[in-house]
Image: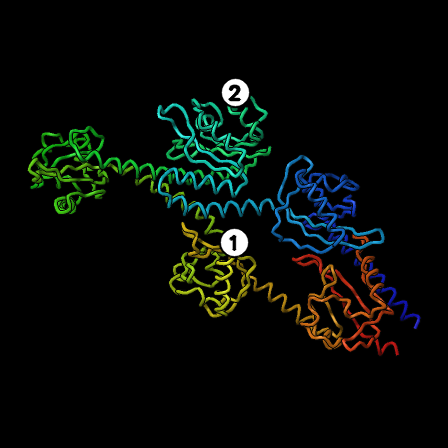
Amino acid sequence: MKDEVKTKENLFAEKTINSEVMFKGIFDFSPDAIIIVNKEGVILQANAEAEKIFGYAGKELINRPVDILIPERFRKRHDEHLKHFIAKPHTRLMGSELELYGLRKDGTEFPVDIALGFITTESGIIVLSIVRDITEHKLRDIEINLLLSLTQAINEAADMNTAIDISLKKICEATGWNYGEAWVLGKDKRSYVCSPVWYTNDSRLTKFRNESEKCVFPAATGLPGRVWSSKKAEWIPDVSIISEDIYPRVTVAKECGVRAGLGVPIISDNEVLAVLVFLMSECQKKDKHLVDIVSSVATQLGAVMRKKLVEERFRAASLYARNLIESSVDPLATISPDGKITDVNKATEEVTGVSREKLIGSDFSEYFTEPDKAREGYRQVFDKGIVRDYLLAIRHISGKVTDVLYNAIVYRNEAGEVEGVFAAARDITKQKRMEEALRASEAKYRGIFENAAEGIFQTTIDGRILSVNPACVRILGYDSAEELIASVTDARKLYAEPGRRLHLVRSVRSNGSVSDFEAIIKRKNGTKIWVLINAHALTDSTGRTVGIEGMVIDITNRKRAQKNFQVLIDGSPDAIIAVDRNFNILLINTHTEKLFGYSRLEMIGNSYEMLLPDRFKFKHAKYCSEYFDNPSTRIMALHMSAFAKRRTGSEFPVEINMSPVETDEGIVIVIDIRDITEKKK
């Protein structure tokens, strides 16, 4: 009997040592920062990852106030939160909607996600914080969402100013700038003036805007002028501390609280069309990724602006066709009712390679690659009185072909009789080249959409699929996006339970977006998979929801693992219970129901103490505090003289083994309970 007791004691010691080693490994090699503070906010322990992401070395953080890791503007609020947390401790998992930031030793800030837990000790509450640097995640989301949202909005803009206005607002909202403005060439074509469109979310900057409207910068002067001349982005960490020579608006900038500044050129065909300037009310060191994001948007905006400018010039060019007397770089001609050329300008001679003398009196259609199409356009002028942007191609005597848009209108004599047609041709070779460049630019940024690891989709509100990326196609088991869109005419057919699609639509309509939405989807071959959907509403100009855009992730393996784990624990002869840090029950096996007499639904979500006799609850609370008292040591609990309580109120002796398990959602405690009634007899 003594040998048996000794063996159990050895096993207990071995498990304790293993637990300590396991926790030390988790603490030291955790990919996330782990920081432990007392109720006064003093750091008791910090792992290597915490020192790394906050820029401290060795044990430099120990016994320092946790405030040194928090931006100054948040410290007062953090102190209040700490007091409330100590008064009413609770567990907070990662993924909250709070915007949280950390402060490095060098003074830079970075976005973080934080999970909170607590440990009750004899000296009071100890707070356990798990901190994750989400800088890359934030920047990647910003870039993808910004490019996706801007692509369609900019292309649908009515004119250049509208496109700039949309870009300023979306860039500021997505990247944290407080103010955005655009600078364009003045009427003298040598200096730069403020565009009429601008954006701010800070009323203090209205005065700064008013003063900026009065400014005219010569070449290479001020932030806009330097960016225009260099054709490169420029970042100023703090405009308020530099000289007026470098930043002429420094005085009003100080008054209005302007600090960091960024200037980015909008370039097309190596020509600067405008300069975007962004400002914020905080000092900030150069953020290369942020510069790249804004520059990417500016590149696409440049192609669109060039297209808008070309369209505006084309509309203006149609006015030239009203009178042959006007000089024009475009080929102009007057044509008689029988189709003979009666006069031309110099541009017509150049584009055809034929002299004015030979052109006059000849049939106008013979100079086009498609004479019949040219004659049809001429007939339309007489039928309708006018024709605009009629696409033709002129052939030079050398064989060179020039794509042109013809605009023509009939002209009449004093009696109102038609005497002929005024026609103007606009060379659109450059426009086509720019359109091809725009398509290439759009293709480049569509690469983000095409190469994303997550499935991305767009549907109408009634379920018609508009677009899917390759990842989404793969998840659903189709060969191509075209096949998927053609095969699935209603997105509801993809759902194993069509009601889930309706639930998704209702949630998006009500809240504007939905996160972590789980559903079972049918693939092309009929197999079913679990997916996680994050989606937001697509709205029209009136704010009406017209579609849904979102990301989809295959979580089948995760679900299968959860199911396999449940099957595994259901096969155990012991009662197995998983609890969170508050010892609320998360999961049980079948034997637990049998042993305690409760159903699964009655136990999930309730406190583990429901299974303990009242006289042991205080002892259990004390044990739990000891269990988490020293994070550097993980203790496996083994109560040799413990009792549990059934639903009927009857008690029975048990052995309890408690083990920590690291999951995606944080630490989960697995409790193994064995009925030792027979052993006690």
**Residue 379 spot, x, y in % from top left:** 12, 46
**Residue 507 spot, x, y in % from top left:** 51, 60
Q: Is residue 47 visible?
A: yes
Please state the total of marks drawn on the protein image: 2
Locate the N terminus by quadrant: bottom right
**Of the residues shown, which amino acid type is indicated by label 2?**
Asp
Q: Residue drawn 45% across and 55% down?
A: 469
Residue 556: quarter of image: bottom right
**Residue 105 spot, x, y in % from top left:** 69, 36
Specify the label residue 81 is tagged with.
none
Q: Spatial distance from mark 2 to mark 1, Cα to Cα?
A: 48 Å
Observer-side mark, 2 or 1, equals 2
Residue 398: quarter of image: top left
**Nearer to us in this view, 676 or 126:** 126
Indicate the secondary structure of the residue bearing disc 2.
Answer: loop
**Residue 201 spot, x, y in % from top left:** 52, 39
13 on left or right of 429? right
**Which tag, 2 or 1, sits closer to the chain's start?**
2
The 10 Å Cα crowd at callout 1, few under 14, some 14 to 19, many 20 or more, is: some
**Colour scheme in use:** rainbow
Residue 341: quarter of image: top left
Indicate the secondary structure of the residue bearing disc 1.
Answer: loop
**Of the residues shown, which amino acid type is indicated by label 1?**
Ala
Q: Farthest top residue? A: 245
**Nearer to us in this view, 514 or 674:** 514
**Nearer to us in this view, 337 or 373:** 337
Specify the label residue 453 is tagged with.
1
Contact (CB < 8 A) between labels 2 and 1? no
Residue highlighted by disc 2: 245
Q: Farthest right residue? A: 2
